Amino acid sequence: MLVTAADFQANVDKYLAMVSEQDIFITMDGKPIAQMIQPKMENTDSTGDIFANAASGIPAKAVRKERTESKPGKPLIGLAAGKLDFPDDIDFCNEEIARLFYGDVK
């Protein structure tokens, strides 16, 4: 959908509701200047999952194993995947990092 910048500013709530159904192209002087699209949640959720696991008490080795095992149809990323050896205490500050990102979550 094409909308002018002035129309977008006047009706931003309307277009925020519509973006889940279709992309919104914002124009100025008849030329597109911006595109508003719905985020792909499968990409944005992955970082949150990592920090949630770190703060939830799940052992670091279990999280690491899940993240490094190849899933059917999904190859491991990186040339050195599975070839590196990490010290057992590599995740010693996960709780501190989660606290810095999210504050004290109880």
Image: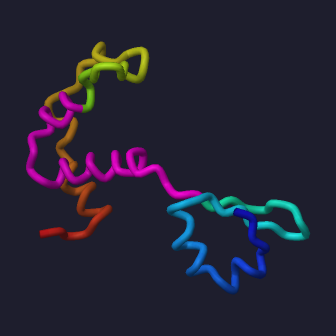
**Quadrant showing the N terminus:** bottom right
Q: In the image, residue 62 lies at what x, y percent?
A: 12, 34
Residue 34, above or below 12: above
Residue 49 shown left or right of residue 73 in the figure: left
Residue 52 percent location from the top left of the image: 21, 53
Q: Nearer the viewer, residue 69 or 64?
A: 69
Q: Is residue 14 above or below residue 105?
A: below
The residue located at (75%, 65%) in the rendering is: 2
Q: How is the image coloured?
A: rainbow
Instruction: Give the quadrant of the C terminus.
Output: bottom left
Considering the whole magenta stretch, tell me its main secondary structure. helix
Query: Where, by quadrant of the figure, is residue 78 drawn?
Result: top left
Q: Could you tell me residue 94's position as x and y percent? A: 21, 49
Q: Which residues are magenta?
A: 37-66
Q: Report which quarter residue 85 is drawn in.
A: top left
Residue 28 in the figure: left or right of residue 52? right
Question: Image point 18% across, 37% down: which residue?
Answer: 63
Q: Is residue 4 left or right of residue 67?
A: right
Picture residue at 70% right of the left edge, 82% below the top: 9
Q: Is residue 53 shown in magenta?
A: yes
Seen as rendered, the residue at the extreme bottom is: 10
Q: Residue at x 40, y 51 (%)?
A: 41
Which quarter of the picture shows residue 84?
top left
